[in-house]
Amino acid sequence: MIGFDIDGVLADFVTPFLLLLERRAGRGPIKPDAYADPNFSDHPFLSKEIVSECLSDISDDPNFWQALAPIPSRHQWRSLDRLSREGRLVFLTHRWQRDTYDINQITCSWLEKHGVSNPVVHVTQEKKSLLIQKLDVKLFVDDRHENCEDVATQTDALVMMPHRPYNRSLNHPKVRRIQDLDEFFVYLTSR
Ligand SMILES: [Mg+2]
């Protein structure tokens, strides 16, 4: 079983989120590497309040998630669809749940729009390593260094982390940094 994170791996979350923060702060630019700390602590002009308000706003807004731009190429989406059809792919996300709409359903339809038929999505606020163990995931892809470190430390899954400006600081012997998703597909076919 293969586990994929969505935001920052398949969906460009960071670009619109940073734009929203800039609008709320009334200034910019915010460099993508500032997102190394998801709370933006010690940022020169982002306060804790601005960050939590923006997080809360996007969580209230299904349109934010529907409008996210896809990161993979069409070819990569087709390969993901194949894995999903074979029942080998699950999606794991820390997106927040709200009573006003169904984030699981929004996430599924976004994945379907980009070509993954019948996606299996797990929305959780717990550590991802718990789900990785429960679902017996052996290969996990995530862009956040905290999640990669958690899964690498707590499970025996192989962890791949797509290179991003905000995760360059993590060096973990069990986390494989990849420059492009193609490296993930090359690894799969080599086994
Ligand atoms: Mg992510």
Image (cartoon, rainbow, N blue to C red):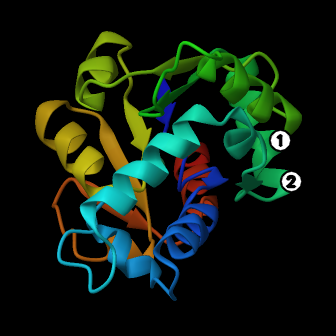
Marks 1 and 2 in Cβ contact (< 8 Å) = yes
Is disc 2 placed on a helix, strand or loop?
A: helix
Q: Nearer the viewer, residue 135 or 9?
A: 9
Decide if ligand 1 comes within 8 Å of the CB at mark 1: no
Q: Residue 166: which quarter of the image?
A: bottom left
Category of crowding for the residue at label 2, using alpha-carbon neighbours closer than 10 angstroms: few (below 14), some (14–19), many (at least 20): few
Tell me what residue is drawn at x 23 percent, y 76 percent. Answer: 169
Q: Is 15 located above or below residue 123 in the figure? A: below
Residue 41 location in percent, x, y? 20, 69
Residue 36 location in percent, x, y? 30, 69
Q: Which amino acid type is shown beneath numbered disc 2?
A: Arg
Q: Which residue is mark 1?
A: 78
Q: Which residue is mark 2?
A: 74
- CA separation in Å, label 1 and label 2: 6 Å
Q: Which amino acid type is shown beneath numbered disc 1?
A: Arg
Total numbered badges shown on the rendered structure: 2
Category of crowding for the residue at label 1, using alpha-carbon neighbours closer than 10 angstroms: few (below 14), some (14–19), many (at least 20): some
Tell me what residue is drawn at x 55 percent, y 61 percent. Answer: 17
Residue 18 location in percent, x, y? 53, 69
Give the label on residue 38, or none: none
Is disc 1 placed on a helix, strand or loop?
A: helix
Tell me what residue is drawn at x 51 percent, y 88 percent. Answer: 29
